[in-house]
Amino acid sequence: MSSSPSTPRPATRIALAAALVGAALALGPALTRASQSGPSGANVGFDFSWDDAKNPAGHSASFLEADGITANNCSGGPLTATTKTCNFVFDYQIAGAAQPSAAHAARFITFWTNPTSYVSGAPAANTGCNSPTNGAGDLGKAPLTLFDCFNSNAFGQVFRAASAGPLTQFRASMTCLAPAGTKYELYALLYEMSTDGSTIAGTAPLGATLVNLTSCPSATTWKGKAFTAKDFAMIPVNLGSPALQAGKFYGVYFTGPSVPGTAPAGAADAMQRAKSAATTTTTTTTTTPWSSFRNQKNTKTPASTTTTPRTPAAAATTTTTVPAALFPGNVPLESSVMTAIRLMTPGAETTYVVDSLTPATCVGAGRNIVLLRTGRCRAQIALRSNGRVQSTVSTTITDSTPTMSDVIVAVDEPTVVYFRNGTALSTDASRKRVAGIASAARRANAVLVTGHTGNAGGETSKMRSLSQKRAKAARSLLRDRGVTGVIAIQSYGATQVVSNSKKDAQQALNKRAEIFLIP
């Protein structure tokens, strides 16, 4: 690929290498899967942009050397505010404002041959990540995969913050090879980098998370597969909204028990906090220069190999308590109606509460904010102990098609419980309806119950009180059926009627409670 006229390109780019999982996986008979898999039989592909000219300035794909500190950046040298080079496909926000990002710019692989053998962990000959690509042009290919393409240590994206504020969103474009029942741990850690982006500054990450890949598009085999944009999803990396400073370089590095090589500095404790277990492995690493992935031919020169022990991430099967963490950055500027957004880690609802400032459009339920109607949603995350506000979030709710992820989930239409006129006594049919959803309610992340009345007499304080009694009655029906999780209630009085008709049959439809199950 030709270099930008204003950016000299070093002769040798950073090391892009095949990852190892151990000799047992690295050698042996051909697999039925597409490429070398991790210990559990799964793999991840990342979309990649080789188009330096179109990539954002001051950003670079990056790998860490065996010391877990030195950055081997795609730029081939120190980074500056104007550096233009290779990047993973990603986007991010600072204080809710979108920042420069890298879009897809590569040839999707249209011919992927299953590795038949491995040499020091690299797929032999023209297989796996080394498969030849079809099509003209001088851009490299995508996806690059965790277990066939990547460097021997942690890998990720370095970016330069153009403004100060919390990192409210970071997403990377991924696809998965996930045979049924397989899973593995992939962590993302955020570090402040040195002034030229060449090393990790400090000894601990600013944020860490276990990446949830359940919404990542998957395939059972990549052999002969023609990849398209539909095979990738922008997966959120929720790092807890750490504060960034303008003009500084930061790096998001992926690592974990399933990633070969040395983990980044301070990763062990950070991963323990993000999840309660880690593993220790020893691997053989392979080094291939970035430049060999440009202008690819059907023949590849074998890569040089070195052996490096992995720095122990933690004692095997260590268990710790995961602290409560808040993720206000999960809330985008625009959201979709009938979805819920995770605002904190599981169990953190015992410490914090989500209080809606606009209950007509959205309501808190456990660790979620539930978006019920179009309009403006504002909510606060506060300490239960003293009501002190920790964060305020806001979003505009529209009728747009939602993009699902591990932090944004769809909410189905509610189950409706009807009540007798002027009372909180439910009908026999409604009680049977509650019994029918009890099993699903017991499995739900949280339940939201809203109470309503008719409006024949207008909205009064009595109506609000009655609607609250109806919501509590519906909650009691769920408790009686063994639902022990979070059940939040919200009373609306006569403000959200189904019908404005004064006829008894139509008013009966207003005298209700609605049960929403948050998955």
Image (cartoon, rainbow, N blue to C red):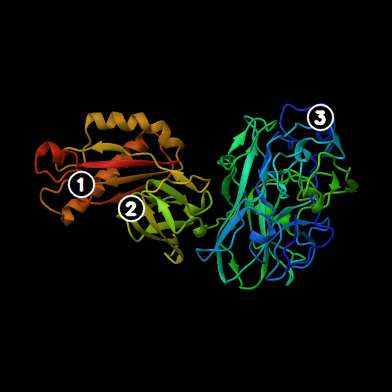
Q: Residue 206 at what x, y percent from top left? A: 65, 63
Q: CA distance from mark 3 to mark 2?
A: 54 Å
Which residue type does callout 2 highlight?
Thr
- Tell me if mark 1 has few (under 14), some (14-19) or many (20+) residues whose alpha carbon lies within 10 angstroms of its own: some
**Residue displayed at 79% across by 32% down:** 115
Q: Secondary structure at mark 3?
A: loop
- Tell me if mark 3 has few (under 14), some (14-19) or many (20+) residues whose alpha carbon lies within 10 angstroms of its own: some
Q: Residue 510 at what x, y percent from top left? A: 19, 42
Quadrant the C terminus occupies: top left
Q: Is residue 202 visible?
A: no
Earlier-in-chain disc, 3 versus 1: 3
Relative height, residue 174 to residue 161 (above, below): above
Depth check: give the residue in front, 154 or 3: 3
Q: CA distance from mark 1 to mark 2?
A: 16 Å
In the rendered image, which residue does mark 3 sit on? 116
Frontmost of labels 1 and 2 is: 2
Which residue type does callout 1 highlight?
Val
- Tell me if mark 2 has few (under 14), some (14-19) or many (20+) residues whose alpha carbon lies within 10 angstroms of its own: some
| Total count of labels | 3
In the rendered image, which residue does mark 2 sit on? 374
Frontmost of labels 3 and 2 is: 3
Frontmost of labels 3 and 1 is: 3
Earlier-in-chain disc, 1 versus 2: 2
Which residue type does callout 3 highlight?
Thr
**Residue displayed at 16% across by 46% down:** 454
**Residue displayed at 74% across by 46% down:** 259
Q: Secondary structure at mark 2?
A: loop
In the rendered image, which residue does mark 1 sit on? 497
Rendered image quadrant of residue 439: top left
